[in-house]
Image: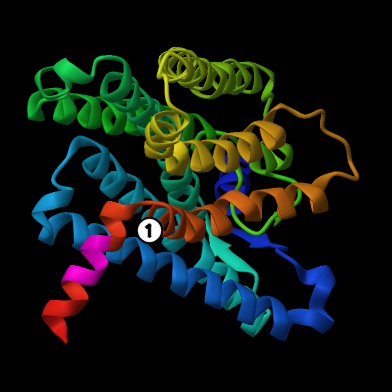
């Protein structure tokens, strides 16, 4: 009983080391993270508002984009405010429940994000390769079904992983050598046997990462094949430009995640892991609305339309 009480006590709190090695630069780190957070939230809120208000954006591609924006806001808000607090105050404490929430929200967003990017690739495939039947195939029911399935599968997988981690005993170090409660980092702190859990997570990494990425590549294989059949250079460029925003986000997001979770681990790699993690935790949500607004004429027109009404 005493041992169980001890283990439970150890589950009460953790200490996130974040970027404490860069204490002399904490003002710079705080300012950079704050700007990234504010731009991410504001940019994605603008996308959500535009899709809701402007009828020209009531299309499948933008409904998927709106869901991506919701995910972006969710996971930057679950991680970056705590990082800002740690950087400013130096107080690295986080409760077990706070850690559990970070892991759950982050896993939900990562899984759902991959699935939504795959759904968007399918949407682009239908729009280009099955153009005459686009509105029949990508009707409201199909879009809602793809969105609901993405969120549901992401939530179920997140809940399963988080519940398994919550049952582990943490009876040694409480120092999380990361800037949030990353799943892999938490497993290293456990004194329980995590072999089975690590195998499950690795297998899921292949399923949730490689399978969607393969489906996206397959979709673009057909898209490129169709585009090459267009006779004029202008026609090819115009058709390909409708995919450019999605391709940019896929490249940035998928490659940073895959590099981080599929690369070999070493004791000296944690600082590099933090930097790579910061790319998709902070930069990707910030770049998302910028990519879709600056590279998309319909979004730019919608921004001008809304601004014109306000002014």
- In the displayed structure, does residue 29 sit left or right of residue 164? right
How crowded is the residue under tag 1: few (<14 C-alpha within 10 Å), some, or many (20+)? many
Q: Start and end of the magenta stretch?
A: 301-305
Give coordinates of residue 222: x percent, y percent: 43, 12
Q: Residue at x 63, y 53 (%)?
A: 279
Name the image quarter holding residue 202. Answer: top right
- In the displayed structure, does residue 93 sit left or right of residue 74? right
In this view, the residue in front, 33 or 214, is 214
In this view, the residue in front, 30 or 184, is 30
Q: Residue at x 66, y 61 (%)?
A: 16
Residue 306 lies within the magenta run: no
Name the image quarter holding residue 151. Answer: top left
Q: Residue at x 71, y 42 (%)?
A: 189
Question: Taking the image as drawn, is residue 177 in sight?
Answer: no
Looking at the image, residue 265 lies above or below residue 35: above
Residue ranking furthest to the front: 232
- In the displayed structure, does residue 147 sit left or right of residue 98? left
Mark 1 highlights which residue?
293
Q: Residue at x 48, y 52 (%)?
A: 102
Give coordinates of residue 91: x percent, y percent: 64, 77
């Amino acid at each position: 009983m005493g041992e169980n009480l001890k283990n439970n006590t150890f589950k009460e709190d953790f200490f996130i080391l974040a970027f404490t090695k860069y204490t002399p630069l904490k003002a710079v780190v705080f300012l950079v993270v704050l700007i990234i957070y504010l731009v991410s939230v504001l940019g994605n809120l603008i996308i959500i508002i535009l899709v809701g208000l402007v009828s020209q954006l009531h299309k499948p591609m933008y409904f998927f984009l709106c869901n991506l924006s919701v995910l972006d806001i969710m996971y930057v808000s679950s991680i970056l405010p705590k990082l800002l607090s740690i950087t400013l105050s130096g107080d690295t404490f986080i409760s077990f429940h706070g850690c559990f929430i970070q892991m759950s929200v982050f896993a939900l967003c990562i899984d759902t994000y991959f699935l939504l990017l795959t759904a968007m690739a399918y949407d682009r495939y239908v729009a280009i390769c099955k153009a005459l039947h686009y509105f029949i195939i990508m009707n409201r029911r199909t879009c809602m079904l793809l969105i609901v399935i993405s969120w549901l599968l992401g939530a179920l997988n997140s809940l399963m992983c988080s519940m398994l981690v919550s049952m582990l005993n943490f009876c040694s170090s409480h120092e999380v050598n990361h800037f949030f409660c990353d799943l892999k980092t938490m497993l290293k702190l456990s004194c329980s046997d995590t072999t089975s859990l690590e195998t499950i997570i690795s297998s899921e990494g292949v399923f949730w990462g490689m399978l969607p990425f393969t489906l996206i590549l397959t979709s673009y294989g057909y898209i490129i094949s169709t585009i090459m059949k267009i006779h004029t250079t202008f026609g090819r460029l115009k058709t390909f430009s409708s995919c450019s925003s999605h391709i940019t986000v896929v490249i940035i997001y998928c490659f940073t995640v895959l590099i981080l979770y599929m690369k070999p681990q070493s004791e000296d790699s944690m600082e590099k892991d933090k930097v790579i993690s910061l790319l998709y935790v902070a930069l990707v949500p910030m770049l998302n609305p910028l990519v879709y607004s600056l590279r998309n004429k319909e979004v730019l027109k919608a921004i001008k339309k809304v601004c014109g009404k306000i002014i």
